Image (cartoon, grey):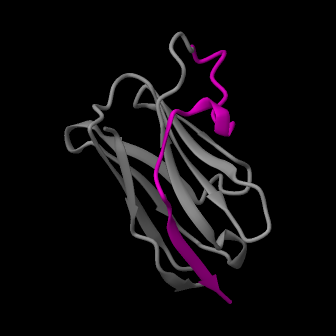
Amino acid sequence: QVQLVESGGDSVQTGGFLRLHCVASGYLFRDNCMSWFRQAPGKEREGIAAIWRGSTASYADSVKGRFAISQDSAKNTLYLQMNNLKPEDTAIYYCAAECPPGRTWVTFRPFTTEEYKYWGHGTQVTVSS
């Protein structure tokens, strides 16, 4: 049984930083895809950072230059380094994994929720002004 467990969420002030972790159990990091999504109150879940085959990263414009996604396959852990946090970053952050078989970089849809098979339960990030 696959489980993704996020941690690292906290309450910080504007300009602060956090590092989120997503530990996978029952799932071996393969040359596939993983991502971070977030959902603010009253808003749809949005993709913000994705990593393809452990190396190629994609970012939403809202976080580009401030957030960085990475993974440590030996530790089965996905990370999201978040710098220069803003109040609009307040949300529950989710990690997601496992794209459909046969995906290529060209057909990969990194910020589409339907793209991923496994999801964590989220970790809360609150940024105050």
In percent of width and height, residue 43 lies at: 79, 62
Identify the residue at image location x=69%, y=47%: 60
In percent of width and height, residue 111 lies at: 67, 39
Q: Is residue 93 above or below residue 54?
A: below
Residue reaching furthest to the top: 102
- Using residue 77 as the reference point, say whether residue 45 is left or right of it: right
Q: Is residue 119 above or below residue 127?
A: above
**Front position in the image: 64 or 28:** 28
Q: Is residue 128 above or below residue 76?
A: below
- Using residue 43 as the reference point, say whether residue 90 is left or right of it: left
**Front position in the image: 24 or 127:** 24
In percent of width and height, residue 55 lies at: 43, 31
The quadrant of the rendering that contains the C terminus is: bottom right
Would residue 74 be visible to someone looking at this image? Answer: yes
In percent of width and height, residue 128 lies at: 64, 87
Residue reaching furthest to the right: 42
Q: Is residue 105 above or below residue 65?
A: above
Magenta segment: 104-129
The quadrant of the rendering that contains the N terminus is: top left
Identify the residue at image location x=74%, y=50%: 61
